[in-house]
Image: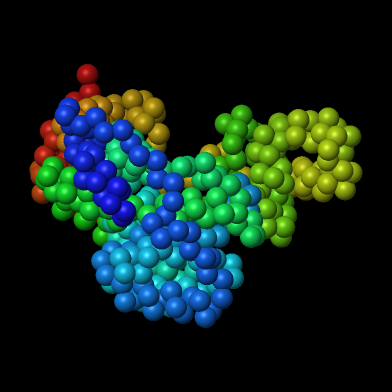
């Protein structure tokens, strides 16, 4: 940091879950320029080799961030990767020009990576060969420490006393060349990430939660790539309006047609056809192109050829035999929806009600969100099918079987034992 930045960070560190001490009234300082200026974008193998050597020779944790083009391009690939490390400075890398960053990943393997909301960036980083073995997630650290706002800008301001300019977070990062203001924003995103990490580590240690955070970070780093979602078309916005199987078939056919077009054109599916238009067509079951053109989402801006391709998708769904139509709802692999528990199993409903109240009380006492203390799905599963022996050891084993970390088991198992003995009124 510059001398001014260091002075501000030292004097404005917040240490009580996001609330400044009473005697600190330091106004946040706008962070306008990276310390060494905006670095050039790395877009060839020779420049990349120099960056790899510099980061391999650097010291301490590596701040890592990635920018995607959500809402503009198909998929979630990275269009810019930002890194910063002591002794190496900041690097901005174009993963379109340099699609294989496995050499960089190897050079910093074993080093702690500092990311904000790591689970959002890790999939696109994995695609280009960057997979951490150790990490520190500043967003998750903020949640565990009890900060009410855990966005990067809010955390940097509350903890370090600087204001980050966030106006370019939703721009089209596939744009080439990238405008200078965007590059400045991208460089600033990793400017103070390690400083934020260090301050949060101290705060977590002060609260006695540092080991808990490390368990969470280790779990994220060790998690395998997510499995492809089954029947992703069922996540179409507005699906709750679609009841009949024939209509579900239209949603599926339109969604799959849209997805193929979006992938071929490398654009966001929503730019090809909106979810609202898909649902509208499914509910209306138009008989021809003219009827389709009268529906919301298929207006005058859509050409005849486009209308014909969408009507063809509707017709394919209408022609399917009943046996090929999708079933309403998705196959249930776990407990039924909680709203159905009172009818299906009143005892389980009583256990769940007691468990929710108990977990809420523990989370409140620890000053953290309930979902970070234990996932709601884990609580539901244990309440629906409790272990045969309701004791701390058996309940703890059940929680661990669903992926709960040791610290979560320690905090939650004792109160769940009591909840699992609750009786229906």
Q: Nearer the viewer, residue 274 or 23?
A: 23
Q: Nearer the viewer, residue 68 or 257?
A: 68
- Colour scheme: rainbow
- The extreme front residue here reads 3
Q: Is residue 125 visible?
A: no
- Residue 406, visible in the rendered structure: yes
Q: Residue at x 53, y 45 (%)?
A: 168
List x then y, in percent, for residue 57.
31, 76
Q: Is residue 270 left or right of residue 53?
A: right
Determine the residue positioned at 83% across, 46% down: 306
Q: Is residue 170 left or right of residue 161?
A: right
User: How far from the left and from the top, in percent, is residue 118?
Assistant: 37, 54
68 on left or right of 367: right
In the image, residue 134 above or below residue 24: below
* Residue 201 spot, x, y in % from top left: 20, 51
Q: Is residue 237 above or below residue 46?
A: above
> With respect to residue 289, does 190 lie above or below?
below
x 48%, y 45%: residue: 331
């Amino acid at each position: 940091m510059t001398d001014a930045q260091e002075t501000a960070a030292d004097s404005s560190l917040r240490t009580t879950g996001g609330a400044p001490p009473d005697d600190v009234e330091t106004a946040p300082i706008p962070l306008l320029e990276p310390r060494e200026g905006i670095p050039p974008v790395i877009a060839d193998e020779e420049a990349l080799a120099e960056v790899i050597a510099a980061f391999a020779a650097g010291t301490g944790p590596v701040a890592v961030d990635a920018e995607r083009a959500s809402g503009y391009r198909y998929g979630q690939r990275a269009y810019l990767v930002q890194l910063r490390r002591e002794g190496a400075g900041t690097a901005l890398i174009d993963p379109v020009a340099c699609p294989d960053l496995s050499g960089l990943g190897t050079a910093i393997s074993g080093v702690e990576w500092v990311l904000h909301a790591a689970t959002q960036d890790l999939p696109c980083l994995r695609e280009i060969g960057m997979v951490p073995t150790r990490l520190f997630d500043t967003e998750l650290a903020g949640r565990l420490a009890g900060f009410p706002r855990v966005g990067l800008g809010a955390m940097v301001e509350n903890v370090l006393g600087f204001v980050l300019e966030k106006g370019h977070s939703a721009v089209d990062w596939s744009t080439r060349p990238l405008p200078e203001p965007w590059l400045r924003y991208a460089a600033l995103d990793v400017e103070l990430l390690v400083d934020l990490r260090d301050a949060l580590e101290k705060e977590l240690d002060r609260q006695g939660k540092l080991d808990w955070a490390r368990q969470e970070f280790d779990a994220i780093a060790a998690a395998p790539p997510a499995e492809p979602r089954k029947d992703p078309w069922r996540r179409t916005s507005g699906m709750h309006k679609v009841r009949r199987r024939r209509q579900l078939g239209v949603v599926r056919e339109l969604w799959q047609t849209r997805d193929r077009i979006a992938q071929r054109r490398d654009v966001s599916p929503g730019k090809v056809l909106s979810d609202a238009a898909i649902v509208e067509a499914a509910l209306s079951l138009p008989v021809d192109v003219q009827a389709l053109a009268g529906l919301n989402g298929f207006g005058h801006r859509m050409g005849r050829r486009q209308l014909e391709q969408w009507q063809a998708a509707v017709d394919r769904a209408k022609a399917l035999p009943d046996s090929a139509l999708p079933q309403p709802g998705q196959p249930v692999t776990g407990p039924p929806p909680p709203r159905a528990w009172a009818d299906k199993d009143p005892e389980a409903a009583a256990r769940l009600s007691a468990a929710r109240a108990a977990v809420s009380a523990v989370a409140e006492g620890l000053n953290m969100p309930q979902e970070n203390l234990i996932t709601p799905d884990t609580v539901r599963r244990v309440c629906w099918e409790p272990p045969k022996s309701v004791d701390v050891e058996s309940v703890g084993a059940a929680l661990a079987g669903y992926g709960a970390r040791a610290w979560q088991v320690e905090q939650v198992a004792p109160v769940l034992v009591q909840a699992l003995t609750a009786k229906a009124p």
